[in-house]
Image (cartoon, grey):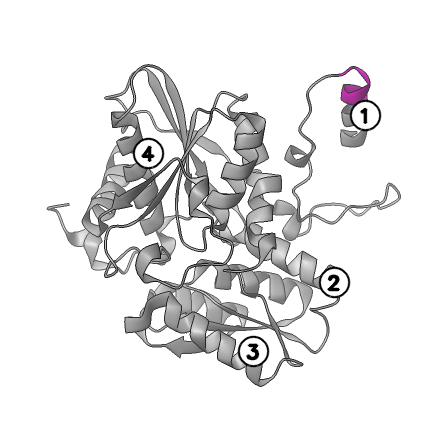
Amino acid sequence: MTAFLIAMAHALQLDVIEPAYLPWCRPRREPSDLRLGDSLLDRIGNTPLLRLERIGRDFPDMQLLAKAEWFNPGGSVKDRAACAIVREAERAGRLGPGRILLDATSGNTGIAYAMIGAARGFGVKLCIPANVSPERKRILAAYGAELVLTDPAESSDGAIVRARELAASDPERYFYADQYSNPANWQAHYMGTAEEIWRQTRGQVTHFVAALGTSGTFMGISRRLRELNPAVECISLQPDSPFHGLEGLKHMSSALVPAIYDPALADANLEIATETAYAMIQRLAREEGLLVGISAGAAMAGALEVARRQSGEAVIVTVFPDNADKYLSDRFWEDESA
């Protein structure tokens, strides 16, 4: 039925966005495939776009919207990139029986790899800072991933260095996914997330705001939105200091810069303080009923700052990468001063 509707839309010269119907990482099925239900990977993508009404009440002429990425089966936006990376590796013959997927992660991409590896039958080995939340370690262990814990003081950069060392030591054993350099990372968002935002806002998005980690989310969505409407403003966010508590985010001037990152793509870059993000997480919980993760708090703080700098009507879209399930042991929840 979907194929028929798309064909009819083309015949009638109507606007149609095909990736909204079929997530980019989903394998194409033949018409004769009569299997019932969805596979796990079929459920990646097409996440809700939430309207933030109470937290944005000071900006009545603007709409503040956020993609609720915890609706992905692995619980985060990283399902999209991990799925795309795995699909491309399988297509190219770089990942298959007997090979182990290896990568560095701060948690969410690792969880996505581990989930997909369990579903598709390949091993997963992850280099991860030792100080990531206990919840993340437990989830990874539950999926059967092998963890290599790295120096917390070196943050995600230390995990990247260790993963490169392991990959070089046994290239026949490992498929080094290298999410920080792999173009499939940003392409997943170019083909999927951006098209969803365009469809869900009916093409009315005026500003896109996202935090930088691997930078894949910002790179892919910004590139595609700019093609759809060159007037869309794209604003990146990063921590305001090399020493920060925004797990998964990078302070680019002091970190190993991802190969897929292009700073020229941003119209502006905003710096977010750790304390500001923590306070925003509490506000989202208590004013919107949304329990979200640390990077989502940073994203919301950035979106509000963009709203403060605007006048007139605007449709500001950001991404909430995950919910709070993996951060509930963090002590900032108990800080009433936030």
**In the structure shown, which secondary structural element does the residue marked by tag 3 occupy?**
helix
Which circle's residue, 3 or 1, is located before the other in the chain?
A: 1
Q: Earlier in the sequence, mark 2 or mark 3?
A: 2
Relative to residue 182, is residue 102 depicted above or below? below
Report which residue position mark 4 lands on: 303
Residue at coordinates 42% horizontally, 59% vertically from top-left?
A: 257
Which label number is shown at residue 7? 1
Magenta stretch: includes residue 9 = yes
**Circle 3 is placed at which residue position?**
167
**At 24% from the left edge and 50% from the top edge, which residue is drawn?**
240
Residue 21 point in image, percent of width and height: 68, 34
* Residue type for callout 4: Ala
Q: CA distance from mark 2 to mark 3?
A: 18 Å
**Distance between the alpha carbons at the discs numbered 4 and 1:** 38 Å
SS at circle 4: helix
Q: Nearer the viewer, residue 185 or 121?
A: 185
Q: Which badge, 4 or 3, is on the more N-terminal residue?
A: 3
In terms of image quadrants, where is residue 113?
bottom right
- The amino acid sitting under disc 2 is Ala
- Measured in 3D between alpha carbons, the distance from the residue under mark 4 to the one under mark 3, in whole angstroms, is 38 Å
Q: Residues within 10 Å of mark 2 (few under 14, many from 20)?
A: few
Q: Is residue 245 toward the left or the right of residue 163 in the image?
A: left
**Compared with residue 190, is residue 15 higher up or lower down, i.e. above or below?**
above
Task: Give the residues drawn in magenta, as a range.
Answer: 7-13
Q: Residue at x 23, y 55 (%)?
A: 241
Amino acid at dot 3: Ala
Please identify, in this view, whether the residue under mark 3 or under mark 1 is nearer the observer. 3
Q: Residue furthest left?
A: 337
Secondary structure that dominates the magenta span: helix
Which image quarter: residue 229? top right
Element carrying mark 1: helix
